[in-house]
Amino acid sequence: MNTVLVGAQWGDEGKGKVIDFLTEESDVVVRFQGGSNAGHTVVVGDKKYVLHLVPSGILHEGKHCVIGNGVVMDPFDLMKELDQVESWGFPLKGRFHISERAQMVMQWHRALDKAEEAARPDGEKIGTTGRGIGPAYAAKVGRYGMRVGDILKPNFPELVRKQVGDANRKLKALGAHELDADEMVNLYLPMVPALMPYVTDTIQFLHESLEADKSLLFEGAQATMLDIDFGTYPFVTSSNPTAGGACTGSGVSPRAIDRVIGVLKLYTTRVGEGPFPTELFDADGETLRTRGGEFGATTGRPRRCGWFDAVVARFARRVNGIDYWAMTKLDVLDEFPVVKICTGYRRKDGFVYTTFPADLDALAQCEPVYEELPGWQCPTSHITDYAELPENAKKYINRILDIIGGKLGVLSVGPARETTLRINI
Ligand code: GDP
Ligand code: IMO
Ligand code: MG
């Protein structure tokens, strides 16, 4: 059984937690896009682990974890994270693999990310994580990127000097600090011995795993509405976090994928700039942020919070082909007397969008259309059996499923590993 797991909203749906849960029944966990802009949290006992580049399956001994060709990998961030994972007591040797085809995020990409963001006027800022993601993907598509395999080649210093020279011209034009090419060469070369043992042909590894009937689990980072094609462009990330990205970002064919799971927070959050139709600016928004602990796992920024948006979720089901939902953070809604579901966006002329419009100017003119349901106003975090959920919580979930389609596979009622209910999967 090969599974693709994607975020169905604007990120931070709880993908890390659900990946950790599904790793039990998988053999290999694969990241296929994004980079250290991701922050995936797994809570085990009283310990909280946040992973950025390393797949969230790493906390299960013996499972293989792969950084696929579609990822942009910052060797600094990776080395730091590998040290951290080993210090937590999870050995990596022999079970962690990096594609030699993956692109690298270099210091100059990070510098460009920050300089480009600073140069954008208000209203056009993206609110990036500053991890160099956009410039690294721009380099990849522009065909001047640096792949992991390049760091192992004898001409690596010349490549660095050429790239730093090109980046410096851009940085200068943006009025930003330029970088010293020799300093960069000396910064990266010492990392080679530590990186080398993990670099491999992951396409070969994944296909051998498939031939041996192993189960692959693809761990999406970011989410559908941050997708470069399907998201709220240009307020998006620079990759395809949607299900198709799992194939292009790993070298595994769509024919090998058996199911797609969408992770869906039972309200909505977004971090960074860009449209968010159900955003709340009142006490309810503050309650969601506080109860949900909605602060970025990567940047610590407070997340914007709002009601559940069924337009977004249905759109996500369509573009990803979601079979099952992993619904998370039900418990965060426990105290609300009323819960709301957005079913459409109403334009001033009365027209209601029931699918996400491409035109953000048109969207900005819209008001969300809400259905209101009674809350359940009792705790749910201790519940281990779906049947024991309060009736109003079941009604809320079922109404959402009516509107968006798909089946409920997993329900999460708290941050800890044990607070995960297997429903229908
Ligand atoms: P990801 O990026 O999709 O992996 O999500 P993040 O880790 O950035 O954010 C999800 C946050 O919600 C983390 O702090 C998780 O520990 C927490 N979390 C996940 N599921 C639940 C849940 O069902 N209830 C509560 N209260 N917290 C949850
Ligand atoms: P996980 O995997 C939430 C957002 C940034 C910004 C936009 C572009 O933890 O769900 P980038 O640095 O990628 O160029 O920033 O995308 N963003 C995320 N928001 N969760 C994430 O990852 C995100 N990764 C990027 O805030 O708005
Ligand atoms: Mg996150």
Image: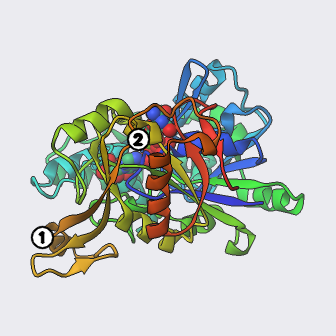
Which residue does the image show at 63% across and 18% down from the upper left? 87
Reply above or below: 237 against 129: below
Q: Nearer the viewer, residue 318 or 84?
A: 318
> Residue 275: which numbered mark, if any?
none
Q: Quadrant for the N terminus, please.
A: bottom right
Q: Is residue 76 left or right of residue 67?
A: left
Q: Amino acid at mark 2?
A: Trp
Which residue does the image show at 22% across and 47% down from the upper left? 115
Q: Is residue 414 left or right of residue 310?
A: right
Q: Is residue 278 left or right of residue 164?
A: left
In the rendered image, residue 160, in percent from the top left (x then y), is placed at: 45, 48
Q: Earlier in the sequence, mark 1 or mark 2?
A: 1
Q: Quadrant for the C terminus, please.
A: bottom right
Q: In this view of the protein, can residue 251 be seen by the observer?
A: no
Q: Amino acid at mark 1?
A: Gln
Tell me the quarter of the picture where residue 399 sits: bottom left
In the rendered image, residue 367, in percent from the top left (x then y), is placed at: 16, 66
- Proximity of marks 1 and 2: CB atoms separated by less than 8 Å: no
Q: Is residue 374 left or right of residue 205?
A: left
Q: Residue furthest right?
A: 212
Per the image, the residue denoted by label 2 is 376
In the rendered image, residue 324, in percent from the top left (x then y), is placed at: 60, 61
Q: Nearer the viewer, residue 9 or 367?
A: 367
Q: Nearer the viewer, residue 260 or 38?
A: 260
Q: Residues within 10 Å of mark 2 (few under 14, many from 20)?
A: many
Color scheme of the displayed model: rainbow
Q: Secondary structure at mark 2?
A: loop
Question: How far apart are the two marked residues, 1 and 2, measured between alpha carbons?
Answer: 33 Å
Per the image, the residue denoted by label 1 is 365
Q: Nearer the viewer, residue 317 or 2?
A: 317
Tell me the quarter of the picture where residue 195 sits: top right
Q: Residues within 10 Å of mark 1 (few under 14, many from 20)?
A: few
